[in-house]
Amino acid sequence: MSGFSTEERATPFSLEYRVFLKNEKGQYISPFHDIPIYADKDVFHMVVEVPRWSNAKMEVATKDPLNPIKQDVKKRKLRYVANLFPYKGYIWNYGAIPQTWEDPGHNDKHTGCCGDNDPIDVCEIGSKVCPRGEIIGVKVLGILAVTDEGETDWNVIAINMDDPDAANYNDINDVKRLKPGYLEATFPEGKPEHEFAFNAEFKDKDFAVDIIKSTHDHWKTLVTKKTNGKGISCMNTTVSESLFKCDPDAARAIVDALPPPCESACTVPTDVDKWFHHQKN
């Protein structure tokens, strides 16, 4: 979408690497809080965290001021997803819908689990590879509930409104019909780290939109301090009713304190390029 731009800080594939979002005035903003949930009627904004065919597990840093995109870390090691034959890395553009929050204090009536404390996730199935940090408008098609370690992690299936085929996709059944096998490849059966609600059934567009709207309501309680965010940074520059709103100079000071952008990337571990075959149990 026009008007937004990105600025990298530090070295890609390093612990310090960050991607900040800026508005049309060149002012730093939070991709979590400052980008409107809606791009248009029935069209949602999506923040692209991971471009298709890449491996680095990038995410909006919910606990950092201004919530830049950073690489996920586990036990002080940067995280990458495996290449699972016949694919390389992520098979869709992966990201989040801004101004949504899966509340860890809310027990979901559909899954019986609480939220995972993140914005709601999106798998965008269009043909374009979208760069990290791009803001696109997407048409929601369906949703899958992943329950990891007792937390609900909703995964929205959507398509870029600018995709040449977007008009042909209006609900989850269109994905099943036009891209056979694609949804099954999204979360292969038998992966031990994933459990699913609804017997791993993808729910339809209307169900998905209802879930997104409920996570938007939870986000509103977060930025208005009606809910304890448990470490989440709600710093923003545009949410008028928010108690965490700051001026552009305060936002700039956050970014200026970080290392400058770096031309060269760190070396990616060689095992990231390994290829695995999925073994059905």
Image: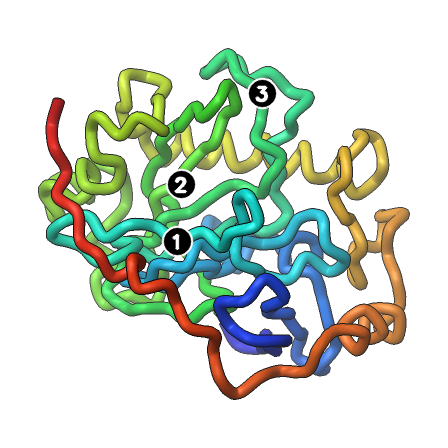
Identify the element where label 3 is drawn: strand
Q: CA distance from mark 2 to mark 3?
A: 17 Å
Image mark for residue 156? 2
The total number of labels drawn is 3
Q: Is residue 86 above or below residue 220?
A: below
**Is disc 1 placed on a helix, strand or loop?**
loop
**Callouts 2 and 1 close, C-beta under 8 Å:** no
Where residue 89 appears, as percent x and y from the top left, is: 28, 56
Mark 2 nearby-residue class (10 Å; few <14, some 14–19, many ≥20): many
Pick whichever of labels 2 and 3 is earlier in the sequence: 3
Pinpoint residue 226: horizontal percent, then vertical percent: 84, 31
- Estimate the spatial distance between the alpha carbons at disc 2 and disc 1, rounded to whole Å: 21 Å
Q: Nearer the viewer, mark 2 or mark 3?
A: 3
Q: In the rendering, at what x and y percent does residue 6 appear? A: 58, 76
Q: Taking 39 as reference, is 164 left or right?
A: left
Q: Which mark is residue 114?
A: 3
In the image, 85: left or right of 163?
left
- Residue 208: percent from the left, percent from the top? 42, 34
When the figure is inspected, residue 273 is found, relative to residue 110, above or below; the finding is: below
Q: Nearer the viewer, mark 2 or mark 1?
A: 1
Which comes before the other along the chain, label 2 or label 1?
1
The secondary structure type at the circle numbered 2 is strand
* Quarter holding residue 278: top left
Pick the front one: 58 or 95: 58
Question: Can you tell which of label 1 and label 3 is closer to the viewer?
Answer: 1
Q: Mark 1 or mark 3, which has the lower sequence index?
A: 1
